[in-house]
Amino acid sequence: MKRFPFLRSADVVTIAFIVSLSILEILFASRIERWVFFVSMNVLICGFIYYSAQYTAFKKAKSNIIIQLFRDWYLVPNILFIYTQASSITYTIHQRDYDSILIIIDQWLFGANPTEWIYQFAHPFITEILQIAYSSYYLFFIALFFELYRRNDKTAFHFGASLVVYGFYLSYIGYLLFPAIGPRFTLHNFFATETELPGIFLTPYLREIVNAGGGVPVGVINPAALVHRDAFPSGHTQLTLVLMYVAFTTKTHIRWWLFVGGSLLIISTVYMRYHYVIDVLTGIFFFIFTIWSGKKITRWWNDVNKENDS
């Protein structure tokens, strides 16, 4: 078996997921309108990952600074691009959503629809705080990894990155297997959200940004037909917990700030009607599985390369 010691476990997981996603897109090419574009971009991304890793490993300190930065930070834009692919093609593959099943499970567990029940506690101040927390999702990751990168703790930086990127891909597998759009479209009137859950100042602007990022730009007539199928599991819950885990195990200065902000974010997933409670519970399970299996994958890859060096 040929070894690639210059690749990190996050690179291996990324390439494996991209290849698997591309195969899926080719198999369902007749249903996926932009499959050629997606597959072509996936090939380019894998090429960039491989050659930037090889280049920086051999050149070390003499490598080009731009390539070094790409090598360390490519996961950020890549995760967003892969998210767009996975969550946007899943409906065309299944040609149906599974929200009805999630609603039945929530009703069976709680005897009511949690997003309807929690509405009794709605208040503009609460909405403002929780919308800010929900919208800060990606900022939390940037803040954590910027601190690790700035203190030059490459071991912690790459270990955290491997768990986070692996967790993202696991959530994408959930989207691909079980497309759902969430209670804001099924149990509630999407167009009444601003009236029923008004904030104070930032909420409407942040809501528009979240909607656009999820495939629903302002002014569309049928948002449920365009929105990305990313309700199950709650990736916001899963990855926020992974983020907290990394922050506390690496003893970052912002760990308690992330704990408070992340806890509010998890609450917001149901309060703001983005997720069913079963999405959140499954996100917690995915978090546990991410940590358990992610550490094993990283350890395995490191051991493989140690054997190769000996």
Image (cartoon, helix red, strand yellow):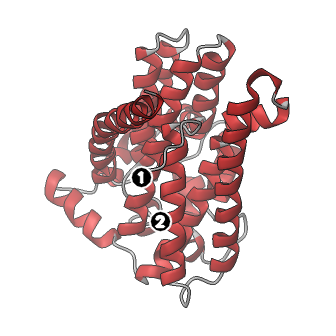
Report if residue 187 is visible in the image: yes
Q: Which mark is residue 171?
A: 1
Closer to the camera in the image, 251 or 121: 251
Residue at screen point 40% across, 36% down: 304
Number of residues whose C-alpha sits closer than 10 Å to that of mark 2, classed few (under 14), some (14–19) or many (20 or more)? few
Closer to the camera in the image, 211 or 175: 175
Residue 298, x across and y down, in percent: 40, 34
In the image, 47: left or right of 135? Answer: right
Amino acid type of disc 1? Ser
User: Which corner quadrant holds the C terminus?
Assistant: top left
Mark 2 element type: helix
Q: Nearer the viewer, mark 2 or mark 1?
A: 2
Mark 1 element type: helix
Residue at screen point 37% across, 58% down: 232
Q: Which residue is mark 2?
A: 20
Q: Quadrant of residue 66?
A: top right
In the image, 110: left or right of 203? Answer: left
